[in-house]
Image (cartoon, coloured by chain):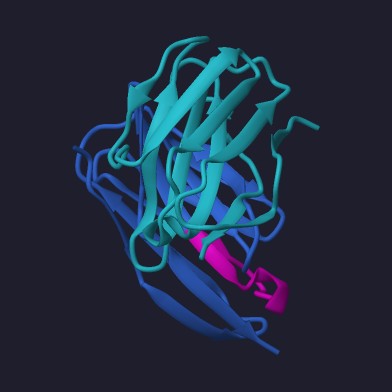
Amino acid sequence: DVKVTQSSRYLVKRTGEKVFLECVQDMDHENMFWYRQDPGLGLRLIYFSYDVKMKEKGDIPEGYSVSREKKERFSLILESASTNQTSMYLCASSLRGAGYGYTFGSGTRLTVV
Amino acid sequence: KNEVEQSPQNLTAQEGEFITINCSYSVGISALHWLQQHPGGGIVSLFMLSSGKKKHGRLIATINIQEKHSSLHITASHPRDSAVYICAVSYGQNFVFGPGTRLSVLP
């Protein structure tokens, strides 16, 4: 079974902490994505990557950065966590051409206190 | 930018009922996806469609490319079908999500 694995299911961090959310896929997918999901706002794209060391801003990149040093791993970084970053974070990957093989991870629910 | 709309926003049904969720989009696409998210859970891909109709168990998805419209049908609904159903469209490298339809199936 193909998989997108997010390292933590639930995470609680303090305001101002640097937070790393990790995502690993075993499908040799070129594309990887980070979304956040909030009630009433649906899924919003934070960052995406088409290849190793490549990154593109999505719709809401402020307060976040990403790292893709290896094809299978895409990390989302909250440089200084704030309470408005409390959310469900979802990682996804796909083959080149966004329509194919689109697979989501199970999500990380982050609470910033 | 592609606008994706879904209806209804919320749906409550009795077990056994036939359910339809609708999705419309504004710009030509390469594929349309139906996704399912259970409470507190991750998202599972149900279907990817570029034309016609697909069936998987009690789930049926159809798409009309000319009308830019898709429907997801659930036959003989069951409480375990209770979830949020999300329509998403892909075009080029873009992927746009609808707002989701929250379905509750009562026993």
Q: Is residue B107 above or below residue B43?
A: below
Q: Nearer the viewer, residue A82 or B14?
A: A82
**Residue B76 is a magenta residue:** yes
Residue A96 placement (x, y as % from top left): 48, 15
Q: Residue at x 48, y 58 (%)?
A: A87
In the picture, measured across the screen, residue A22 lies left or right of residue B87, that is right
Q: Nearer the viewer, residue B15 or A108?
A: A108
Q: Which residues are magenta?
A: B72-85
Residue A2 appearing in the image = yes
In the picture, measured across the screen, residue B30 lies left or right of residue A17, that is left
Q: Residue at x 68, y 26 (%)?
A: A25
Q: As drawn, which residue projects farthest toward the right?
A: A1
Residue A13 placement (x, y as % from top left): 58, 56
Q: Image quarter for residue B94? A: top left
Residue A27 placement (x, y as % from top left): 69, 20
Chain that is coloured cyan in the picture = A
Residue A98 appearing in the image = no
In the picture, measured across the screen, residue A82 lies left or right of residue B83, that is left
Q: Image quarter for residue B101? A: bottom left
In the picture, measured across the screen, residue B43 lies left or right of residue A38, that is right
Residue A69 placement (x, y as % from top left): 57, 12
Give the colour of chain B.
Answer: blue
Q: Is residue A66 above or below residue A15?
A: above
**Residue A15 is a magenta residue:** no
Q: As drawn, which residue projects farthest toward the front?
A: A16
Q: Quadrant of the N terminus of chain A?
A: top right
In this rendering, the count of numbered labels is: 0
Q: Residue at x 62, y 73 (%)?
A: B82
Q: Residue at x 69, y 53 (%)?
A: A9
